[in-house]
Amino acid sequence: MKILHTSDWHVGRTFHQYSTIEAIQQVLAEFPKLIKLHKIEVVIVAGDIYDLTNPAPDAVITLKESLTRILETGAKIVMTTGNHDSAARLGFAGAFSSLAGLYLVTEPENIGSPIKLSDEHGAVDFYGIPFLQPDLVRNLPWMPEDVKNQNHVIGAAMDVIRTEIDKSKKSGTRSIVIAHTFVAGGETESSDSERAITKDPLIAGGVDVVPVSVFKGPDYVALGHIHSRKELAENIRYSGAILHNSFKEASKPRGGWLVSLDAKGLSAVDWIDLPIPRPLVEIRGTFAELLSDPKFEKYCNYYVRAIYTDPAREIDPMVRLKKRFEWCADVLHEPSTIHENSKESYREKIHGKSDLEIIKTFLPDTRNGEVATPEEIKLIEEVIAEYQTGRLLS
């Protein structure tokens, strides 16, 4: 059996102020081609199918049309809910969508009941672990009373699944587990686009970590939540998101793992690239360089994060940069040098000074050491003169 392991589709997500609907449509349109090319029999989506629990109509339509095209190839689809998804909204169709080959795993009560598929070598059981919020699953019969975090929840779920795997192994059944959680080793590939998966304030960073050893037993474990691919063990992997959702992910490939099973279990895992509709790039320089340097011309159709290094902030930098980079998504000011302000108190700074001297002292403190220009001094003098004569108030 050949299985395509994907995760974190995040259909309906916005990238800064831009919609990603057209991009996700373009990527998902490649799936039927890949399925036919590689003879894929099952497509896995390991959570975060949508980006919002209440997705917009265009996101729902996009997902429906994409899944339909995949099913038309004859491949099956196994999807679990992630922390971005609404289990109730996705799960309502599960009772009858399985008749068409779409299996939605949304109910934690059914963790020990696998989706049973088969190939020429026999049975393959797919165990889906939907996203489990500890506070909401305490009353399940297989959940320990003192459950506190993802580690406890996933550990209890895997104990249930391992019991079933051990029973089925006697008949040669192979097994796949799908889970959406944060597993130790994945932190090196995490980014700022991943939402915390626990609300426990006692856990640093809002996320607790599940040990890799928890997933001992299955032939393959398809993980979701981390947005970059990661191999934690030969048979335990993250596939990453299928779109770039953060500039920290810009250099990371997008795609999925092609998992091959033979009669004995896992036989091979290979990477399949997916298209990147609009690449991301982070560019750095003075504001003048960003606006005119020819070396940046090739990024005009990229999503751009522009970092300008001038001492002082620019006025309306995004508006001005968009004239060159239509898809500029983020602008940061990171001065190449930092001016160290005087440690004098405000009273000491202004003591005995004229209005003009006070303003000339104030400007460098607020503009990273940049003093007033002759033109600015002339303007300030005019404003002060108008104020002193009363004309500014009239």
Image (tube, rainbow, N blue to C red):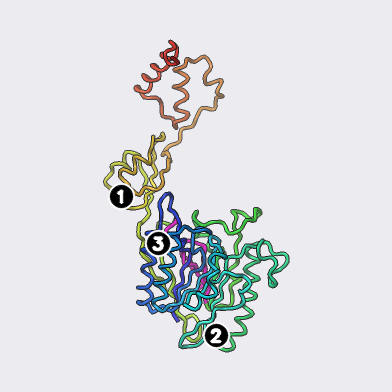
Q: Does the CB distance between marks 2 and 3 fall below 8 Å? A: no
For label 2, count other residues whose C-alpha is less than 10 Å away and answer few (under 14), some (14-19) or many (20+).
Answer: many
Residue at disc 1, secondary structure: loop
Q: Position of residue 22 (x, y in %)?
A: 37, 59
Residue displayed at 64% across by 76% down: 160
> Which residue position is annotated with label 1?
300
Q: Position of residue 34 (x, y in %)?
A: 37, 73
Q: Nearer the viewer, residue 56 or 320?
A: 56
Residue 224 falls within the magenta-colored stretch? yes
Kind of residue sitting beneath label 3: Ile
Q: Does the CB distance between marks 1 and 2 fall below 8 Å? A: no
Position of 373 relative to 160 (above/below): above
Q: Quadrant of the C terminus?
A: top left
Q: Work out whether mark 3 precedes mark 1 in sequence or the reverse, and give the earlier one.
A: 3
Q: Position of residue 314 (x, y in %)?
A: 39, 35
Q: Which residues are magenta?
A: 220-245
Kind of residue sitting beneath label 2: Thr
Q: Nearer the viewer, mark 3 or mark 1?
A: 3
